[in-house]
Amino acid sequence: MNAVPVHPVGALIGIVIAALIVSTIYWMLHPPASHADVVAERAEQALEEMVGSIIVVFSQEIHSEHMMVLAARLARRERAELLAVYVIEVPLILAQDAPMLDEDRRGYDALATAEVIAQHNGVTIRTELIHARQVGPAVVDLAKREGANLIVLGSYREGKYTGAPLGRAIEAIASSAECDVLIGVPGPHGRMLTFERTAASTSTSPS
């Protein structure tokens, strides 16, 4: 059998094509992580040592749905208890235990969403609906009773309010809590995670 001559250029082209095929197959088998996965992984690494039990807070001005996946992953990794709480502020003109049907419905809807996310991530979760005069003190007191190691808060900023404070309730919790606080603020360029440490200086990092 006669040997088939191989031109160097043809051999180089063949090697390039083979390399492209191999790299394409590798990319298909190892797709790049989404931005949300990267954010969660970084936060998990940073919070690994501080987590024991976790409270995720919801209220009329605290929107933590976008933080539930992160909280569930942390709870699963650290085998921590996970509690989702919705706090309803009751006006002084009403009894504190007075029914507030619209707010109650929104609260139960938010807690149901939290349950679905936790179950999807293989985590057991407790939920609680609280009527209180103020969200901040209610959450701080709850964290003390539960012996929480971490409070997770989510917030949002509408475009015209960019740069505005995070909100009265969030600031009250962050300044008064006796445990660590994680605040997540989604924005057009990603998510900002702010860690409020109880025994160390505050640090803020974009992700």
Image (tube, rainbow, N blue to C red):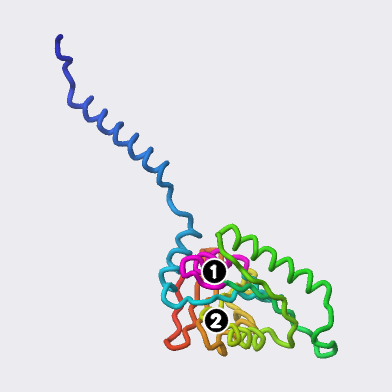
**Is 18 in front, or is 97?**
97
Q: Position of residue 153 (x, y in %)?
A: 59, 75
Q: Give SS at disc 2.
A: loop
Above or below, comparing residue 27 to residue 113 in the picture? above
Q: Give SS at disc 1.
A: helix
- Pointer 2: what residue? 148
Left or right placement of residue 60 versus residue 205 in this view: right
Q: Quadrant of residue 105?
A: bottom right
Above or below, comparing residue 101 to residue 9 in the picture? below
Three-letter amino acid code of the residue under disc 1: Ala
The quarter of the rendered structure image containing the N terminus is top left
Q: Is 58 within the magenta?
A: no
**Is 163 in front, or is 166?**
166
Q: Residue at point 17% right, 15% down?
A: 4
Q: Is 69 within the magenta?
A: yes
Secondary structure mostly taken by the magenta-highlighted segment of the chain: helix
Left or right placement of residue 100 versus residue 22 in this view: right
Q: Quadrant of residue 125?
A: bottom right
User: Local crowd at mark 1 within 10 Å, few (<14), some, or many (≥20)?
Assistant: many
Bounds of the magenta segment: 65-81
User: Local crowd at mark 2 within 10 Å, few (<14), some, or many (≥20)?
Assistant: many
**Is 49 in front, or is 79?**
79
**In terms of sequence position, does the residue under pointer 1 or pointer 2 come before the other?**
1
Q: Quadrant of residue 117?
A: bottom right
Badge 1 vs badge 2, beta-carbon distance below 8 Å: no
Above or below, comparing residue 130 to residue 69 in the picture? below
Three-letter amino acid code of the residue under disc 2: Ala
- Pointer 1: what residue? 71
